[in-house]
Image (tube, helix red, strand yellow):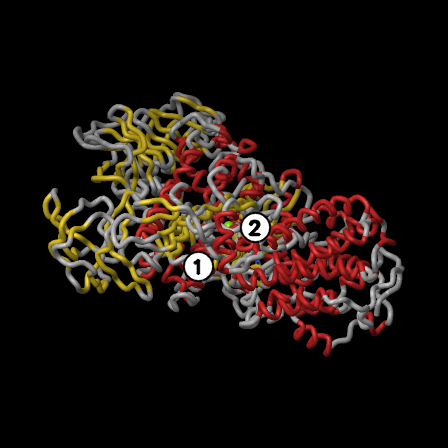
Amino acid sequence: MVSAEREVRGPGPRPRGRAEVVAAAGPVVRASGLARPTVGQVVRVGPSRLLGEIIRLDGERATIQVYEETAGLRVGDPVEASDGPLCAWLGPGLLGATFDGLQRPLGALAERGRWTLGAGLEAPALDPARRWRFTPLREPGENLVPGDVLGAVAEGPFEHRILVPPGAPAGRLRRLTRGEFAAGDPIGEIESERGPGLLHLAHAWPVRTPRPVGDRLPVLDPLVTGQRVLDMLFPVARGGAAIIPGGFGTGKTVVEQTLARWSDADVVVYVGCGERGNEMAELLTEFAGLEDPRSGGPLLARTVLIANTSNMPVAAREASVALGMTIAEYFRDQGYGVALLADSTSRWAEALREISGRLEELPGEEGFPAYLGSRLAAFYERAGRVVPLGRPGRVGSLTVVGAISPPGGDFSEPVTQASLRLAGTLWALDTDLAHARHFPAIGWTGSYSLYVDALAAWYRARVGDDWEACRRDALGLLARERQLLEIVQLVGADALPDEDRIDLAAADLLREAFLQQHAFDPADAWRPPVDQLALLRTVLRARDGLQAGLRAGSTVETLSHSPPLAELRRARSWTGPNVAERLAALGEELVAPVADPPDHPADPPGKAVP
Amino acid sequence: MNLSVRRARGADRLAGSLLVLRRVADVALGEEVLVHGGDGRLRHGQVLELDESFVVVQVYEGTFGLDLEETVVELTGESFRLDVSTGLLGRTLDGRGRPIDGGPAPVGRRSLDVNGSAINPAARLGPSEPIETGITAIDLLATLVRGQKLPIFSGAGLPGDELAARIATGARIAGNDRFATVFAAVGITRREADLFRTAFAGAATLDRVALFLNLADDPAIERLLTPRCALTLGEYLAFELGMHVLVVLTDISAYAEALRELATAREEIPGRRGYPGYLYTDLARLFERAGRVRGRPGSLTLLPIVTMPDDDITHPIPDLTGYITEGQIVLSRELHDRGVFPPIDALPCLSRLMNAGIGAGRTRPEHRPLADQLYALYARGRDLRRLVVVIGEAALSPAERRILTFADRFEAELVGQGEHRRSLEESFELGWSLLADLPAEELTRIPLALLAERRATRRPRAERAGEPRSSSRRPPP
Ligand SMILES: Nc1ncnc2c1ncn2[C@@H]1O[C@H](COP(=O)(O)OP(=O)(O)OP(=O)(O)O)[C@@H](O)[C@H]1O
Ligand SMILES: [Mg+2]
């Protein structure tokens, strides 16, 4: 098998004057000989042209973080510099596509039979063969500034607005052509002080640079999710940021996927960062078949998927989040409401930690680099409600929802703690609730929304003027329950006065009939806010009814077995157009004076019931 | 068939499992090396790190017995590969894939890099077909689905391995005979190795099973290779040959310890409890090799076994495993002590892909509501049990007592099936029979129509007998 053996000592002579690898360990490679390297510059490493990025310069030594598997790399392998930083390609063809963290089109590659991902995979992000019908909105001779809407492409039901790239100079439009173009084709020409320049359907933008905006606006409406516990108790504003920390299996992914499916965003960018491949596959298949109730097209047509699963190279995880953010900003700049859903930001932070460790940087808490907090801040700060650059004037929003996977489910760890300061809404997943199969397992003790005051006017106008009162009562009841349960743990429920037992029964009803929501039950998975509030109101009225019944002389047992209550417990699965009215009617029934119903006797203690 | 094997004599540093030598031209990261010791022994290793002057090699067998002068390092030019073929089925191999059953050397059809490469997530086919394991607690409440990765969280002395062997030998996929099992045992004792051999031999499935055994006294670093060898064979059988493959990995804790040992030798900054910060990624690289691929008929289902140190589910190994896998089967020491086999604690068990694999046309149309109902009642029963300790049983209402009885029967009958394999049919019947004694208002998870249909065909037992059933542990009130 061995036809030639040679004994060697030390490295051979190496050709001078070209950039090459001098050291390699895991995803970190050092190179020398690069001409005028820049931090952030993209390089290609080795014979397979692995994609990497310069992250540090020491004299003429460049430290490169390589986004692909480095096995097989040798000292002396060539390193090739590109002309700029890591960029995202932005244009028609993004919607419905699946990319990896480096924007390689995984869906297109899969269609071509690439079922495994090897090193040095190169493919254009936007299919150069696909053509789009462009309709101009501007006339030659008009003066244009960055961000101006040039025209539009119909991407299925979606109006994809083509913008003058934010980095471009202002100038006079010389030519803009109606017709069919590929993403990379020139569609027109602009004359600026820098001379003539071509306009294209697509443009590139560096992923680590936030896209500039005209103006930042205060938030005023919620991202409607159709989830009762979110919309009614802990809403997130359009343009706000929410985090979902939770131990494994508590429901982070289900919440993120539920938002991707049901939230009223115009565009959803879903970043699967260091998570499971099957989850991405499931999302892809399901979304291709589901109809978007707002546009009538498939749900996938408003979604961009970025899948950098846990078995894919770690360094690219770090890039995937920035890529997703840039794509989201691009749609925001078109004047849309965009939701960026990142699952899980912890895997992204771990990628930072791993690279930092390889660089032998001084570790901070739990080995994370000291700059973890500022990186997270830079991420969440890209959320917002804005007036984009350019004309016509429009408003876009970018809502960010980041899942966090704290080790051992313990929220005191650095990623959760650093994110808490940055997000306006916290959906704290509770392991005990998840184990009790109370889903969504969003704990009411730890969770909060700082947007409630800002959104109150919207709720009053669109949902009901008692939203704040109901919300307060519901949270109050749950707080009361918590106190009572502590006593029950010590002495049992029987020792409580009847008023308190009524509160316990009402809180139990609130949990079961209102807070729980089955993501996989078609009737229950999504409810409009008006129905949500109607249900909450009815549950709270049930408590009034129970209290009144007690005052009228009934027992807790009798009261908690009343038929209208049983009906209320199943009201979650009611469907049809008049759910709110039916709930209101049920509410009346619940506060009506109760007589002991003969067919529902209380369990006499100590005797078996037939 | 490598044409450029190179040799280098002498080492610069030997420490634990690491060997550092002066750089040799053309060394590649990850390359497999042979280390010839002055003691005449042959060792194996892998290139971990390169710089201008040095090469860092990780030696699987450790550097004990090596010296700086006489050591010769032979570079093979390739990463570690396994020769795979169906000929490995029916064989017992060591942790690196060499036969140890006295049989002839297997003929390889393909030589594959054991590290594999990531499956394109967009080429994956979502899991959707159930595997009938024959274990009621799993089949009813946490259904295993083809292409899933579902770990068993066990504890020292708990029968995690027995359960895995039982699943591996009892698993059926409706109407499919292209089924194979690859069993990788990492750091196990000889006694455990014998247990597996016997389990498979007894089940007459031996010719469908490949066993990779890395024994406790085999080199610890070799443990890093064993699961990779098993998964490489599994992938080949599943995605090249279209077979349905179940890969069992035991024990992930031993694997993680080997990884920690290596990280320590490399003087890396330790993460939680001394495990390296990349433990998540490393485990994910193994576990994510499970799945199905569009356009390819086979599937790879993964059943890792994790011994929870101190029965602590928040320990980094079970914790990170849970963050990667699609659910978990958890064993309970309490049930084990009470003689329940398999001692599955249904409450923390979860199969996250269950919904995709159950229901009409897959298992039974009523699977979801039945499972939800059994689970909800059992959870309440367990709560009540805790309460009884505080306030005594007399303070319970009859309704509550019925639920306690249900929880007892759930453990004794549904979970504690003993050695017997249960068909899906039997499991469902048993599930319904446990509900038969409960009044309809307790069964809120079962749609009314379905309940009416069940009750029409079958009268509740309590009604027939006129008395609630009593449990063996609790005298009737
Ligand atoms: N709203 C819900 N309705 C019904 N079931 C749910 C809901 N949320 C979560 N679940 C159940 O919990 C399981 C785990 O949820 P999920 O996968 O979202 O957890 P996770 O927090 O993302 O875990 P990991 O960190 O391991 O990825 C789901 O497979 C499902 O069975
Ligand atoms: Mg998840």
Mark 2 against mark 1, which lies toward the viewer?
1
Label 1 is placed on what type of residue? Answer: Asp
Chain ID of residue with mark 2: A
Residue A494 falls left or right of residue A4: right
Residue A369 percent coordinates (x, y): 43, 31
Residue B24 falls left or right of residue B237: left
Residue A124 vertical placement versus A354 (above, below): below
Residue A148 vertical placement versus A418 (above, below): below
Give A318 or B353, whichever is nearer the viewer.
A318
Residue A61 percent coordinates (x, y): 27, 27
Q: Tell me the SS state at disc 2.
A: loop
Chain ID of residue with mark 1: A
**Does residue A527 appear in this view?**
yes
Residue B416 falls left or right of residue A218: right
Give B268 or A183, whichever is nearer the viewer.
A183
Q: Residue at x 23, y 36 (%)?
A: A78
**Residue hosting label 2:** A249
Whichever of callouts 2 and 1 sits on the residue coming sooner in the sequence is 2
Instruction: Check if mark 2 and mark 1 are on a common chain.
Output: yes
Q: Tell me the SS state at disc 1.
A: loop
**Residue hosting label 1:** A264
Within-10-Å neighbours for mark 2: few <14, some 14–19, many 20+: many
Label 2 is placed on what type of residue? Answer: Gly
Residue A73 vertical placement versus A150 (above, below): above
Residue B111 percent coordinates (x, y): 38, 50
Q: Quadrant of the N terminus of chain A?
A: top left
Residue A578 vertical placement versus A506 (above, below): below
Within-10-Å neighbours for mark 1: few <14, some 14–19, many 20+: many
